[in-house]
RNA sequence: GCCGGCGUAGCUCAGCGGCAGAGCAGCGCACUCGUAAUGCGCAGGCCAUGGGUUCAAGUCCCAUCGCCGGCUCCA
């Protein structure tokens, strides 16, 4: 018991949602919450004290406003999982003698901890570690915060051989408060806050094992990272695991194979092969893209895949991008396979003479680029070594920046809307290493700002994350599983026009330098298709479906009629196949459902005699008979609208 | 590229020193069927590739290639 001479002194606490409390000076938050009672108090993880997040064991020293953090609060969830990561570290320390600790933060949906083991850990051992974690939770060890001096901290971690922790302490700013958290026999350097005790953890699960460079630097040692997650209720963990399973089922690599869309082969690692069904999706995406770009005033170009070395030297790629490029020789001359389309577009611009009245000039290109990606980074269609960018370069007057950027944003919005993606926007500003005058940067960044503001679009600023030639706006798609993908980007570029000495003739008859926008909407056709596959779970909307309808005759007697039905729909450009195998109708339907074909047209005796088809929809099942020409017209209309107005039948 | 794991039939997987297996898919035959799997039969393999250990190697060891989970990087 602490002796306190001011034991009678009271302080006033404003507890959010619960009103005012008066308690003795030095009362801990936990004690106050116990007194207050209620659901929130029981689920409390930490508290926000006048805006600062602190442990529940923090004593109250003055009149304050207090807010309880629970798992529902993202900060609360982080604290919960951060404590789980400490328990993981404790378990590992108990089980393995010679192990050194790296770092162990909470991340989205979970946590990890990095360890240096003498002998690599095998995945089977995760179960053992999990069991030890359970034990520590049962032990219900209180977490105690202690602050110590830099010298004390260094001595402590040096004595314990924790070289990584020593490095962390050494790198802390001189004025930093250095704190450790202790739970039983385990002490870890940590700013906190934490749960009050390990017993507050309920469902902790270790998920996988991976290598990770110390401090993310590929020149430093590689540690072993254990990933896990934690939830206050078993049910929440189960739901999360179910979501992971669901994501696995939607994996575009699996669906790509099952739906026969594309393949990869050892003969060309990272180079995708598109199959006929996959090509249909590509072509439909391109068709939509061309229609919309023509409407938006773009002109399409195509530039060569292989270009001379000198061009890449001029563009700066030779110096800055060489390790990602492929090279070849033609008649003794050095050439490179293009990793980007811009230099080609520069040459197209330079082949003409432009007046200010010709601008903006919007040159679009479905450009196939090749980039040498490190072998370990390849990932299905998401990360490949050759891909098609839906590129465009807009050459314009400086005063046209705002309008053009707004135009691109509008186009981006139209595209993502069609696929049912929501998205958020990020604005990246001038990085350390960059080119151009301050004035240019300010002007460009202000222009991007202005467009976002005028459109009332909320955005996040990524300070210093722009490209070296200009600021940019990135679009992050959110798919049906809630994952986000960086997709479209709009980059302002003052550098390329300079390097290539681009000019236009102004109203004053003098030569001026145009400004350029570099932008993509799909990003890369390959990656976008991968996203679509996962977003839709392979269930493509009618206009993208590789097979839009399948005709299913019930017996051989209807084969002739079935062929007529197929031919009738094919004449109008509908992608329709015929399943005339000697199988039962149920079997054919099952197969069509698994292939996610939008319409199954059952043709039996009744349909033949009435010139109709029995329509079965992928989503809703049997819809009953419809006259063939009525169905055909409806289907055509539905395909043409690209799902903008889904009809009921 | 780095760390760890994995490569067996088209696909999903079993076999883990002693004769290479199953289900699905495929092919053939029979069945002619009304909204998610008809039956029978037949094929299908340089067990990723190259080396080694062993009387004997999918199985153990080494190397290479590819894939998977991460790190780094990125459309």
Image (cartoon, rainbow, N blue to C red):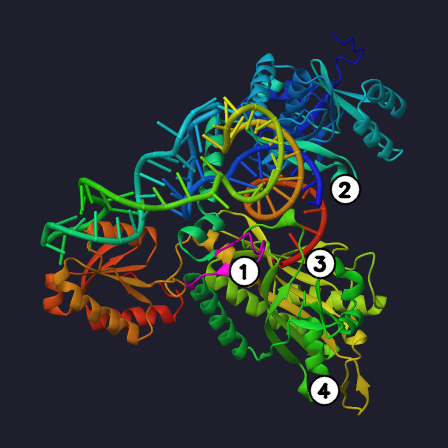
Residue A54 point in image, percent of width and height: 70, 28
Secondary element under disc 1, as helix, strand or loop, is: helix
Expressed as whole percent of the image width and height from the top left, the position of residue A557 reads 12, 62
The quadrant the C terminus of chain A occupies is bottom left
State the separation of the CA atoms marked 4 and 1: 36 Å
Distance from label 2 to label 1 (Cα)? Answer: 29 Å
Helix or strand or loop: what does disc 3 sit on? helix
Using the image as rendered, state which of residue A141 and residue A11 is in the foreground. A141
Residue pointed to by mark 3: A324
The disc placed on residue A356 is 4
Q: Earlier in the sequence, mark 3 or mark 1?
A: 3
- Left or right: where does residue B22 sit relative to residue A342? left
Q: State how far apart marks 3 and 4 are (Cα).
A: 36 Å
Badge 3 and badge 1 in a common chain = yes
- In the image, which residues are magenta? A263-276
> Is residue A112 something one can see in this rendering?
no
Q: Is residue A159 visible?
A: yes
Q: Quick check: do tags 3 and 4 share a chain?
A: yes
Quadrant in the rendering for residue A443: bottom right
> Is disc 4 in the same subunit as disc 1?
yes
Q: Which mark is residue A526?
A: 1
Q: Residue at x 36, y 69 (%)?
A: A639
Compute the Cα span from label 4 to label 2: 48 Å
Mark 4, secondary structure of its residue: helix
Dot 3 or dot 4: first in sequence order is 3
């Amino acid at each position: 018991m602490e002796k306190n001479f001011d034991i009678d002194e009271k302080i006033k606490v404003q507890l959010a949602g619960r009103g005012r409390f008066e308690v003795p000076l030095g009362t801990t938050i936990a004690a106050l919450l116990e007194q207050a009672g209620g659901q929130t108090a029981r689920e409390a993880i930490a508290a926000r004290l006048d805006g600062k997040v602190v442990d529940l064991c923090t004593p109250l020293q003055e009149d304050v406003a207090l807010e309880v953090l629970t798992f529902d609060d993202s900060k609360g969830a982080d604290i919960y999982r951060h404590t789980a990561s400490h328990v993981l570290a404790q378990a590992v320390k108990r089980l393995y003698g010679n192990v050194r600790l790296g770092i162990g933060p909470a991340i989205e949906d979970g946590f990890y901890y990095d360890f240096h083991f003498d002998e690599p850990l095998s995945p089977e051992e995760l179960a053992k570690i999990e069991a030890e974690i359970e034990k520590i939770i049962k032990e219900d060890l209180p977490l105690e915060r202690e602050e110590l001096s830099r010298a004390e901290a260094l001595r402590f971690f040096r004595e314990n051989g924790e070289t990584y922790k020593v490095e962390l302490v050494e790198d802390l700013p001189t004025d930093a408060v250095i704190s450790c958290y202790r739970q039983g026999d385990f002490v870890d350097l940590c700013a906190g806050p934490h749960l009050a005790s390990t017993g507050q953890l309920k469902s902790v699960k270790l998920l996988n094992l991976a290598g990770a460079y110390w401090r993310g630097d590929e020149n430093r040692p590689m540690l072993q990272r254990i990933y896990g997650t934690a939830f206050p209720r078993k049910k929440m963990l189960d739901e999360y695991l179910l979501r992971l399973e669901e994501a696995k089922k939607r994996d575009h690599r699996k669906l790509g194979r099952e739906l026969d869309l594309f393949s990869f082969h050892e003969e060309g690692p990272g180079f995708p092969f598109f199959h006929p069904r996959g090509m249909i999706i590509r072509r439909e995406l391109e068709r939509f893209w061309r229609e919309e770009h023509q409407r938006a005033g773009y002109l399409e170009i195509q530039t060569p895949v292989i270009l001379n070395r000198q061009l890449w030297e001029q563009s700066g790629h030779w110096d800055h991008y060489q390790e990602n490029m492929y090279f070849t020789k033609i008649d003794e001359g050095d050439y490179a396979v293009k990793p980007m389309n811009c230099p080609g577009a520069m040459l197209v611009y330079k082949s003409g003479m432009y007046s200010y009245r010709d601008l903006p000039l919007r040159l679009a290109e479905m450009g196939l680029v090749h980039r040498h990606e490190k072998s370990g980074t390849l990932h299905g269609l998401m990360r490949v070594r050759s891909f098609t960018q839906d590129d465009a370069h807009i050459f314009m007057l400086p005063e046209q920046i705002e309008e053009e950027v707004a135009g691109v944003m509008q186009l981006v919005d139209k595209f993502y809307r069609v696929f049912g993606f929501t998205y958020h926007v990020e604005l990246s500003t001038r990085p350390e290493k960059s080119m151009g005058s301050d004035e240019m940067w300010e002007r460009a960044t202000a222009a991007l700002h202005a467009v976002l503001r005028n459109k009332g679009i909320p955005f996040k600023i990524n300070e210093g994350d722009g490209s070296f030639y200009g600021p940019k706006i990135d679009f992050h798609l959110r798919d049906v599983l809630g994952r986000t993908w960086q997709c479209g980007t709009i980059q302002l570029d003052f550098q390329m026009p300079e390097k290539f000495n681009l000019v236009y003739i102004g109203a004053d008859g003098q030569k001026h330098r145009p400004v350029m926008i570099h932008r993509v909407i799909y990003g890369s056709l390959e990656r976008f298709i991968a996203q679509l596959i996962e977003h839709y779970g392979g269930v493509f909307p009618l206009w993208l479906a590789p097979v839009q309808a399948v005709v299913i005759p019930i017996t051989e007697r209807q084969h002739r009629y079935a062929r007529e039905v197929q031919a009738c729909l094919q004449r109008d450009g509908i992608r329709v196949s015929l399943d005339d195998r000697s199988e039962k109708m149920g079997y054919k339907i099952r197969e069509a459902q698994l292939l996610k074909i939008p319409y199954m047209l059952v043709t039996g005796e009744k349909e033949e005699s009435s010139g109709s088809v029995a329509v079965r929809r992928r989503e809703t099942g049997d819809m009953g008979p419809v006259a063939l020409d009525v169905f055909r017209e409806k289907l055509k209309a539905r395909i043409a609208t690209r799902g903008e107005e889904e009809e009921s039948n």
